[in-house]
Image (cartoon, helix red, strand yellow):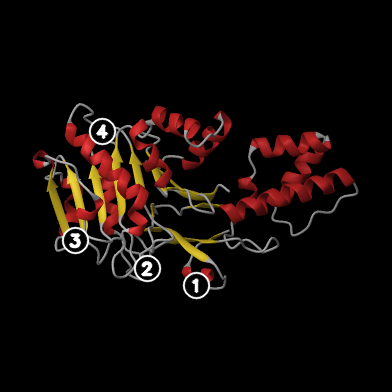
Amino acid sequence: MLVTNKRQASNYEHTQQVCTSASGDEVWCVIDPEHDCPPACRMKHPEQLLTADDWLRVTKKFRLSGKSIRRLKRVWAMGDTEFQTDQPKEQWAFHELEGIMLHKMKRHHRAKRGVSYLPFHTAKTDNHAVSNHLIIANTGAGKTRFCSNLLCRPNSDGELYAANRPIVCFSTHRDDPSMAPARKLHKKKWTDINYNKLDGRLSIDMLPRGCLVIFDDCLEIKSDFRSKVLYDLLTQIATVGRHHTSAKNIPTEFICLTHHGSRRELATVRNAARFWTLFPRGSKQQCVHILKNRLQLGKKAIETLLNNCGNSRTATFDMHHPMKLISEKHVELLD
């Protein structure tokens, strides 16, 4: 179940922060709430949650007439507190539609006007919940800027992902202004590795324990032996990074920015990544391909998810239970 502020979230036993915004708006997730728990996200017009497919399914199931459908719609449009009717079918349909709305109120949340959400990686990480992140998009879609925002935006408590840990960055363009804010903020902990000077195999033991390793568009040239070296290092981090911990039990994690998320060399990386970020507006074809072939989603499910994202530039899938989709304009639970 979704909750829109930390104060409400504190009333529940098991919660995790899902996303944050520049204006301080946050969304939290209650893990495995009680079945009859009332929704925490309230709406002024809950009937807007009902889609044409919802109406079609329910009205077809109970064989309602046009008059009955108009009577049902009038209940929520007029703000009535109860629905009175002598027709059992109308009463059954009302309860089913109300159940659909309550279900969606618990699992869907739309951002307020002017608010843009960004996935939040918990600052209290350990080797039981590794926050590896795979960012997939074409050139110019905004991968590097999105990564920089992840590293720079704190939550309402001032907690910052990647704070107080070493950051190692492999990049073919170290002067990219999109990553400049993150480099400036973490300058004492930030280490840039010169891609052109790589000349041998790299091991995870060469990295500081508990560090965050960024692979910024340095895996694309398959004919270059250095890409093979970095693929091997990335696979090592994905496989044993959770055991390569610092004194504070912080695991070694990665953020991988790539153009081709379906490559065979990234099979282990995809399985190890908790977060997948896609860019539906910039590379919709690749987005549909990955959702279909890697997440086994059907055509209708993919279309529904992308429509829910609206005009959002990014769509981030949090694979940990409960599975979540976080776009700039909305959050929804997928489990």
Q: Which residue is mark 3?
A: 186
Q: CA distance from mark 2 to mark 4?
A: 32 Å
Q: CA distance from mark 2 to mark 1?
A: 11 Å
Disc number at residue 7?
A: 1
Question: Quick check: can you spot residue 272?
Answer: yes
Left or right: residue 270 versus residue 86 is left
Mark nearer the viewer, 2 or 4: 4
Q: Which quadrant is the N terminus positioned in?
A: bottom right
Query: For the residue carrying disc 2, how many other residues have a C-alpha within 10 Å: few (<14), some (14-19), or many (20+)?
Result: some
Disc number at residue 139?
A: 4
Taking 153 as reference, is 144 above or below it?
above
Q: Quick one: 311 or 69, which is closer to the camera?
A: 311
Taking the spot 83% from the left edge, 34% from the top edge, the residue there is 63
Q: CA distance from mark 4 to mark 3?
A: 25 Å
Q: Which residue is mark 2?
A: 156
Taking 113 as reference, is 52 above or below it?
above
Q: CA distance from mark 1 to mark 4?
A: 40 Å
- Residue kind at label 1, given as amino acid type: Arg
Query: For the residue carrying disc 1, how many other residues have a C-alpha within 10 Å: few (<14), some (14-19), or many (20+)?
Result: few
Taking 146 as reference, is 31 above or below it?
below
Labels 1 & 4 near each other (Cβ < 8 A):
no
